[in-house]
């Protein structure tokens, strides 16, 4: 017996019949960004830092004004922080790569809870 194909039969096409230099390249899954989680958490902490700075600035204004009745300003300031924080989170989400979005929203939720605590504490200290 020989390895030749008998007359009249068509040889089977398969990967073993194609020389290796003619095979298409194997698609590899894309590599994950090792800094994606850090990038998402850092973005959430930057928004949180801006919110805390706003709370502390309003606290300083209320304390330096000498009038404790200015504490009512914490209500509109809290609403402003909620709306502006949500808008900032949506804008940042659009600009972040896909791998950073989940860590951003998880850290953002934790920062939101911490922001409510800071808001309540600064409001109480302002009284």
Image: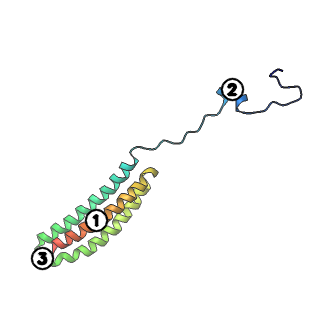
In this rendering, the label closer to the viewer, 3 or 1:
1
Q: Which residue is mark 3?
A: 67
80 lies left or right of 26? left
Check disc 2 and report the residue beneath it: 19
Instruction: Report how far apart the C-alphas of labels 3 and 1 lie in the structure.
Output: 24 Å
User: Is 21 located above or below residue 108 in the figure?
Assistant: above
Q: Which image quadrant for residue 46?
A: bottom left
Q: Residue at x 33, y 68 (%)?
A: 82
- Label 3, secondary structure: give it: loop
Which quarter of the figure has residue 113?
bottom left
Q: Residue at x 19, y 65 (%)?
A: 57
- Within-10-Å neighbours for mark 3: few <14, some 14–19, many 20+: few
Give neighbour class at mark 2: few <14, some 14-19, many 20+ (Cα, 10 Å): few
Q: Depth-wise, is mark 2 or mark 3 nearer the camera?
A: 2
Quadrant in the picture for residue 66: bottom left
Could you tell me residue 84's position as x and y percent? 34, 66
Residue highlighted by disc 1: 115
**Residue lying furthest top in this view?**
2
Vertical order, 98 against 86 (above or below)? above
Quadrant where the C terminus lies?
bottom left
Residue 7's disc is none
């Amino acid at each position: 017996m020989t390895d030749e194909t008998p007359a009249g039969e068509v040889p089977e096409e398969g990967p073993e019949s194609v020389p290796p230099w003619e095979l298409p390249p194997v698609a590899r899954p894309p590599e994950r960004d090792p800094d994606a989680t850090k990038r998402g958490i850092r973005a959430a902490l930057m928004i949180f830092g801006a919110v805390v700075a706003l709370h502390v600035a309003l606290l300083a204004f209320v304390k330096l004004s000498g009038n404790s009745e200015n504490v009512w300003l914490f209500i509109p300031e809290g609403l402003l922080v909620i709306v502006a924080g949500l808008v900032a989170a949506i804008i940042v989400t659009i600009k972040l790569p896909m791998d950073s979005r989940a860590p951003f929203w998880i850290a953002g939720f934790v920062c939101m809870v911490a922001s409510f605590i800071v808001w309540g504490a600064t409001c109480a200290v302002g009284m």
